[in-house]
Image: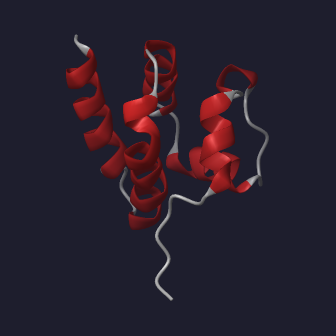
Amino acid sequence: MDREHRLKRLRFRAWHRGTKEADLLIGGFFDANGESWNDEEITLFEAMMEEQDVDIMAWAMGTAEVPARYQGTIITALKTLTYIPIAR
């Protein structure tokens, strides 16, 4: 599968998680960062999309320990939470 197809597939998966909160957090994160990922990071994010939304959200908010296999640049960027639009 080529890079463009993988990213398109991941974007859909990131924005269709099952809850609005997860869609905003994970989909917003993908939109802000996905295009800049290398193949290794895309593969890691693909694996992360198999995890439960509550776990991914807990890792992002720092309320649960991040498994060693996901620690690195992607989870660090996910934890910033600056990619989520907040109406003021």
User: Given the current orientation, which residue lies at the most extreme top position?
Assistant: 1
Q: Residue at x 69, y 39 (%)?
A: 76
Nearer to the camera, 19 or 75:
75
Q: Residue at x 52, y 42 (%)?
A: 52
Figure check: 50 above or below 30: above
Figure check: 64 above or below 43: below
Residue 13: x percent and y percent? 31, 40
Left/right of residue 21 with respect to residue 77 in the rendered view: left
Left/right of residue 78 with respect to residue 7 in the rendered view: right
Q: Residue at x 69, y 27 (%)?
A: 72
**Colouring mode (rainbow / by chain / secondary structure / one colour):** secondary structure
Left/right of residue 66 with respect to residue 50 in the rendered view: right
Give the total number of marks visible in the rendering: 0
Residue 21: x percent and y percent? 46, 65
Figure check: 33 above or below 84: above
Nearer to the camera, 51 or 4:
4
Residue 26: x percent and y percent? 46, 49
Q: Residue at x 52, y 35 (%)?
A: 51
Figure check: 40 above or below 29: above
User: Given the current orientation, which residue lies at the most extreme bottom position?
Assistant: 88
Locate the N terminus by quadrant.
top left
